[in-house]
Amino acid sequence: MLNVPPVVALTLLAMAIVHAVRVLLLSPRANVEFLLLFSFIPARYDATVLAQGAVPGGLAADVWTFVTYAFIHGDITHIGLNAVWLLAFGTPVARRFGPWRFLVFFAVTAAAGAALHLVTHPGDLAPMVGASAAISGYMAAAIRFVFQGGGPLEMWRTPESHAYRVPAAPLSAVLRDPRILAFLAVWFGLNILFGVGTLAIAGSEAPIAWQAHIGGFLAGLLLFAAFDPFGNAAPRDEGPDPGAAPDPTRDPTPNPDPDTEPSVH
């Protein structure tokens, strides 16, 4: 808890400040106006609703609400649960990606969650809030490397500073790993149960935007490689063909030790 990456701590602080301002400083009317401007409302993209002037903000809000909704939460239970999951899954991703990749990944996966929510709730006037889609993206990113040999969840892992830089598993290998498949089965199963109303978050009566969770998760799983600074596990080098002619341009000096630690920028 005392070694949380600063970018994770600042993200949590931003969420806490937004919630405190809404609860402590804004009047009920101002809070509604705030939600209309910064939460994600599918009806914003319905021409019929827009013609009635029900959702203000114009083109700018059409764009920024794909991300800003993720910093708003319904109540203290909502923000508390998301904080726990962000600490658990955002921390390893932040240690691997660095702060700027971490933040851009947050925005991309939040937007992907909002996009799937929009597709499944066209014209809906109910605002969607919460960081769960982005956190689901971090979950998907984390499973690409935390189970790898020497990674954060490996019993005989490398030193802490190296564990978050192990080569990631290729997506094809991820979908064959029994541990990851078990994680995916549980995760998707829980979201389906939330979606059909079998499960609910204690202390909250708000419906769960589970489609947004899935949108963020799929984006995190598929886009991980575009953000990862360390790459996938490389195939084993079989060496040069013994029947091939020698390359006169090849440097005869020995190759560096393949176990040498990569530089970090």
Image: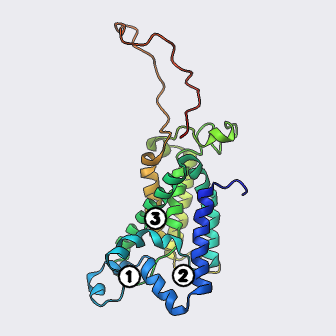
Tag 3: residue type?
Ala
- Give the numbered dot on residue 206: 2
Q: Position of residue 87 (x, y in %)?
A: 63, 60
Residue 122 appears left or right of 9: left
- Give the numbered dot on residue 110: 3
Of residues 217 and 37, the one drawn nearer to the viewer in this rendering:
37
Q: Identify the secondary structure beneath mark 1.
A: loop
Image vertical order of residue 123 relative to residue 186, above or below: below
Q: Residues within 10 Å of mark 1 (few under 14, many from 20)?
A: some
CA distance for labels 1 and 3: 18 Å
Q: State the residue at coordinates (54%, 49%).
A: 98
Looking at marks 2 and 1 on the same chain, the residue that comes earlier in the sequence is marked by 1
Q: Nearer the viewer, mark 1 or mark 3?
A: 3
Q: Quadrant of residue 15?
A: bottom right
The mark tally for this picture is 3
- Give the numbered dot on residue 124: 1
Q: Identify the secondary structure beneath mark 2.
A: loop
Instruction: Assess whether mark 2 and mark 3 are in contact (beta carbons under 8 angstroms).
Output: no
Q: Position of residue 53 (x, y in %)?
A: 32, 89
Of residues 120 and 114, the one drawn nearer to the viewer in this rendering:
114
CA distance for labels 3 and 2: 19 Å
Q: Position of residue 9 (x, y in %)?
A: 63, 61
Tag 1: residue type?
Asp
